[in-house]
Amino acid sequence: MASRSDLRVIRMRDSHLPEVFSLIDKENWGWEFAEIQQIYRLDPGSSVVALDGRDVAGLVTCIDFGSTAFIVHVIVRNGWRRRGVGVRMMENVLADLDSRGASTVELHANPEAVDFYGPFSFKRLEDISYYSKVPPHTHHRARPDRPAYSWLSPGDTSLMSEVMSSSTGYVRDDLERALSCMPPGQVLAKAGDCRTSALLLSRTGLELNGAGPWFMDGPTKAEAEGMMQTMLSAVPAKRTDVLAPESNEVAKAALESCGFSMAKAGIVRLARSSRPTGRFPSSVLSIGHLGLI
Ligand SMILES: CC(C)(COP(=O)(O)OP(=O)(O)OC[C@H]1O[C@@H](n2cnc3c(N)ncnc32)[C@H](O)[C@@H]1OP(=O)(O)O)[C@@H](O)C(=O)NCCC(=O)NCCS
């Protein structure tokens, strides 16, 4: 093994993706190769690898949406850990984002690794939980007390980004660019009475559906449950994952009554920002798997 000073931290390239995926896969976080390719395609300029000769010793995947950037994976190969590789990669990525003017960098940290991010000025915004549901997704008949939703065209990025921006506070242009590069598989929405609701199926893999972001303005548990059931009745019969803010009791109750189980609690949403940042409002029932989307 080379010494730390022999390691090179460089921009990730297409040719690194198989080894990058193999390192991510070892962590058992449930990502698929096609998704790592999608992340890279969404932003081929912000992710880095640490190379030991030609071998990938570490990686940071990152998507710069414009004003906000999201760090998706930070991994150092076993054997290279606690030797400063993670810090070197993070410094490289953050310096690059700073030079491009990204005002906020967000990530979802494993509870065990939160302290790693403190020295880079990341602050804890809120805890989130990861819920999962295995098929079958029972098809419930619509009940009269449940509002009807319509399926939006995933290509209608303008309307979607407007709704998402007003709920989450993310910059509309960032959302529109992200959605047009990576359109969701399904979008369920309802607008009326000055209340807009939307639930996206933003992440689809061979074995999973990643549902979210999900916004509802002041829903009851029954309304939230009705919306999620409507989405479940339309998604492919695969495991369905959702990330929900831990403080959102309506989301928690609705997910549990739809058959979701909590797979991991205590994931921490962190941000490093030159703008005021905080937890999402209660209208955000679930968040995106890639930050904004
Ligand atoms: C977390 C991880 C990326 C850190 O990379 P690394 O190269 O080992 O970290 P560094 O050597 O640069 O660490 C610098 C400092 O960060 C802190 N640190 C490192 N790993 C840490 C961890 N897992 N938890 C908390 N603090 C950590 C320590 O203070 C460390 O300094 P020290 O070694 O002098 O005590 C690496 O341990 C890893 O790949 N873990 C498994 C995957 C993972 O959990 N990734 C993070 C997902 S949010």
Image (spheres, helix red, strand yellow):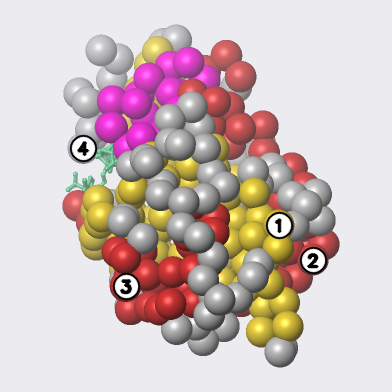
* Point 37% across, 41% down: residue: 136
Asked if ligand 1 lies within 8 A of label 2, the reply is: no
Front position in the image: 171 or 252: 252
Helix, strand, or loop for circle 1? strand
Residue 134 seen in render? yes
| Disc nearer the start of the sequence (2/1) | 1
Asked if ligand 1 lies within 8 A of label 4, the reply is: yes
Label 2 – label 1 distance at C-alpha = 13 Å
What's under tag 2, amino acid-wise?
A: Leu
Helix, strand, or loop for circle 3? helix
Find disc 2 in the rendering and name its residue. 159
Residue range highlighted in magenta: 17-32
What's under tag 3, amino acid-wise?
A: Ala
Label 3 near label 1: C-beta < 8 Å? no
Find disc 3 in the rendering and name its residue. 253
In the drawing, what numbered circle is on residue 82? 4
Q: Which image quadrant: the C terminus?
A: bottom right
